[in-house]
Image (cartoon, helix red, strand yellow):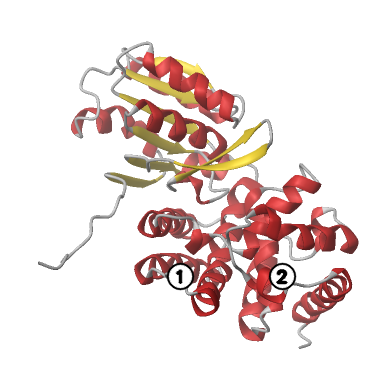
Amino acid sequence: MPLLARMLASPLHLEIGAGAVEGVPQLLHDRYISTTGSVLVAVGPSTGDEIWQRLEPRLPGATFRAVHEASLSAATELQVALGERGYDAVVAIGGGKTLDVAKYAATRAGIPMIAVATNLAHDGICSPVASLEHAHGKGSFGVAMPLSVVVDLDYVRAAPAPLVSGGIGDVVSNLSAIEDWLLAGAQRGEPVDGLALAFARTAAEAVIGRTDSVQDEAFLVVLAEALVLSGMAMAAAGTSRPCSGACHEILHAVDQLYPGTAGHGELAGLGAAFATYLRGQEDRFAQVVTCLTRHELPCLPGEVGLSQDQFTAAVLAAPETRPDRYTILEHLAMDDGLAAERVGDFVTAVEQVRTGVR
């Protein structure tokens, strides 16, 4: 008998709204995640500690643990802590780094994890991937998706602007990643999952054309939903392919060559703009640049503190960050001279879009 359907991993519960964090204790009880309150609450810096102070009186059986860095060692230490007591679940409160540490630890410990996101910097709030630093750089590790995702818009609004608008760049980069996946399918015969593409494209299209901003609650809700959909796309595909292509190869190369240059979502958006330019997709390129500019996200190397030569070096190094992945960069196989020329042309094209000259 043929397989008539497939099961997709997804959060059991999603809540996005002002004051959403107040419902976490009730969520744990009503969904039978933890009826005893025996949970480990992992909090990141800044607002994570504040939220814990608010929840502690209503979670008398919980244990508090601070997460200071998004490293493999920190995640392993958290995993060990989970094994020291029979916790029902992990409640992770903070940004993407804190959530990634908790996702890894909870997966290895075999217990559910609740993600309480305090910003919308990238699609890690719901993805089946944890990005963690280790002795040899940064790696991506397959993990279980959060059982529940809570996004409290009060804390999102209070976050620094780059930790909110960065998610826009990450979501919009889906459009570039999709084109790379389709290219790999056409050129290399790589299997392409249509359902994963649908999730990823829907997420990006929901955001790219909106004219409101991160100051508007309606926009924040759509952005949060889009980030969750991106996670669903990766879960459906069983890989980060629908949300990561040349855009993220460039991001990782910049991180390796020039650490601390900019945030994940900002670099993903910049990488997506450049990759879209390389494909000659003029209308889509203009749409991406217009969206990123509207939300004050970088579209030029200089806007993240890089010279054109430095950005060219990152473009040339990018394919080595994911040797198994075929994108527009691998397809063009640019040498030093051609890459420098295309970067220069890209800078001119961005400026033309911004001034209305195409």
In the displayed structure, would residue 130 be above or below residue 231? Answer: above
287 or 129: nearer the viewer: 129
Residue 7 found in image quarter: bottom left
In the displayed structure, would residue 173 be above or below residue 283? Answer: above
Q: Amino acid at mark 2?
A: Phe
State the residue at coordinates (37%, 41%): 144
Q: What residue is shown with label 2?
A: 274
For this orientation, the residue located farthest to the front is 188
Left or right: residue 220 versus residue 237 is right
Name the spot of residue 38 as percent of width and height, x first. 29, 17
For this orientation, the residue located farthest to the bottom is 358
Name the spot of residue 329 as percent of width and height, x first. 69, 69
Name the spot of residue 224 as percent of width and height, x first. 45, 53
In the displayed structure, would residue 54 be above or below residue 17? Answer: above
Q: Amino acid at mark 1?
A: Arg
Left or right: residue 286 versus residue 203 is right
Which structural element holds mark 2?
A: helix
Q: Report whether residue 297 is seen.
A: no
Name the spot of residue 75 as percent of width and height, x first. 52, 27
If the image is split into quadrants, where does the N terminus sit? Answer: bottom left
State the residue at coordinates (24%, 24%): 34
Q: Residues within 10 Å of mark 2 (few under 14, many from 20)?
A: many
Q: What residue is shown with label 1?
A: 201
Q: Report whether residue 267 is seen.
A: yes
If the image is split into quadrants, where does the C terminus sit? Answer: bottom right
